[in-house]
Amino acid sequence: MSLSSNLQEPTFLILAALADGDLHGYGITKEVEELSNSRVRLSAGTLYGALERLKRDGLVEVAGEERLQGRLRRYYHLTDSGASALEQETARQEWVIEVARTKLRARAAARLRPVQAAHPAQLEGTS
Amino acid sequence: MSLATRLYWVALRTYPADFRQANGEEIVSTIRDCHDAGDAHGTFSQALSLAYNGNRLRWMHATGGSVAQTFRQGVAWGVVLLVAWQAGRALAGIGRPLVHGYTHAYPSPADIALAAGWLLALVLLASARRKWGLVALGLVLTGFVASQVNFALGYGGRFSWTFTLQFFLPVVLPLLCAFLPPMRPVRLSLPVITMVVVVAALVPSRTLLYTLPGLSGWAVEAAGCVVIGIVVFLASLSDPRWVVMMTLLVFVPLIREFIPELSRGGGFSSYSGVLLLAVLVPLGAVTLVLRARRRVATRPTR
């Protein structure tokens, strides 16, 4: 699925929230908040904008609806395409994280290395 | 219905009607669930988010593509509208001696050629013959600038660039947007064609109305403004391209007002106004276009 390269964080988190079961709008909001350690708090406008795009791209579908205390709740389901897009994005993020880790390790190693190629003038100044 | 719920429904008016009917109730229910659970978002924050996302969705729905695509189509419509306005003005100019009993100067061959040029550009652009329309527009713009400079030189007294720019820059600057390549072929819908005809007829009708006895000038001007205002308001509710189109039209009098203010040595506000209108707005448009083109270029084929 080519869409994975365009997944923004809220969209990625919504897909991740739906990965282990169907959820309604409020359920998705709470799950996203938990997954992001309270860093991402979706407003209704952002949530339903993202859900609309995901539905249009076939990554999410409506699994059913119910009415509780006069409030309409629709349950959203992650489709196979959605699961595939989530897997691709997860793999991409893992790769980015691995690259970043490798670079950080190299940086730390370079800092620990003793100063070998200092300029002779600098060495004279310190003596 | 509580005040907060009413506010959400008002904000939901920004969404396309079909989306609002399908999802409005569910969205409001979700917000109420969030509030009951002590959600961090306040009522106004939720309503603002709805208004922002509703407008975004409306812009995307208008062309079935991106916000940039809708913007560029609006610009293309606005260009046709501006050309219609100019064609109407040119026609009114050469027809004025007929209406006012030849108390005005006779039109020169250049005036007649310019009016014909504007009409030709209008017909070509409105009938989606973009390539030839742009050629005609380029020629007529060159002729228009030349005639304005020539008029200023022959007017007597000292030649003033500010005075001259005031006449041709407000017309030329927005019309340069015509040369931005659209992402899709631009077709005019029936309401846009109606609008183009109305705009083209406005100046000639005003000229004609002034000749009627007992009709004061301000009444004609006010009636014209009210008609345009109502049409724009109604149109902007249905399709955001209308808003872009009308913004382009409003551009003309705004620049015309800013240039004399600049020449009077106005303070920072005048310069910033000119900067905003003459530089930042076109720059913003070009940036949007380039971004949209890059997105199209990088999008893989399915």
Image (cartoon, rainbow, N blue to C red):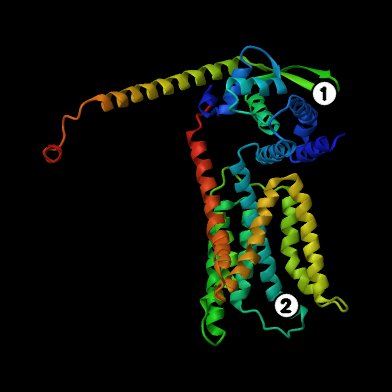
User: Could you say which is closer to the camera, residue A100 or residue B232?
Assistant: A100
Callout 2 secondary element: helix
Q: Is residue B137 visible?
A: no
Q: Amino acid at mark 2?
A: Arg
User: Could you say which is closer to the camera, residue B54 or residue B93?
Assistant: B54
Look at 55% across and 19% down and name the residue there: A86
| In the depicted structure, whether residue A51 falls above or below residue B105 | above
> Mark 1 and mark 2: span between their CA atoms?
65 Å
Name the spot of residue B58 as percent of width and height, x first: 70, 40
Look at 71% across and 28% down and name the residue there: B39
User: Could you say which is closer to the camera, residue B182 or residue B139?
Assistant: B182
State the quadrant of the N terminus of chain B. top right
Can you tell which mark lies on residue B291?
none
Can you tell which mark lies on residue A71?
1
Name the spot of residue B78 as percent of width and height, x first: 65, 55
Look at 55% across and 72% down and name the residue there: B165
Circle 2 chain: B
Residue B97: quarter of image: bottom right
Q: Is residue A108 visible?
A: yes
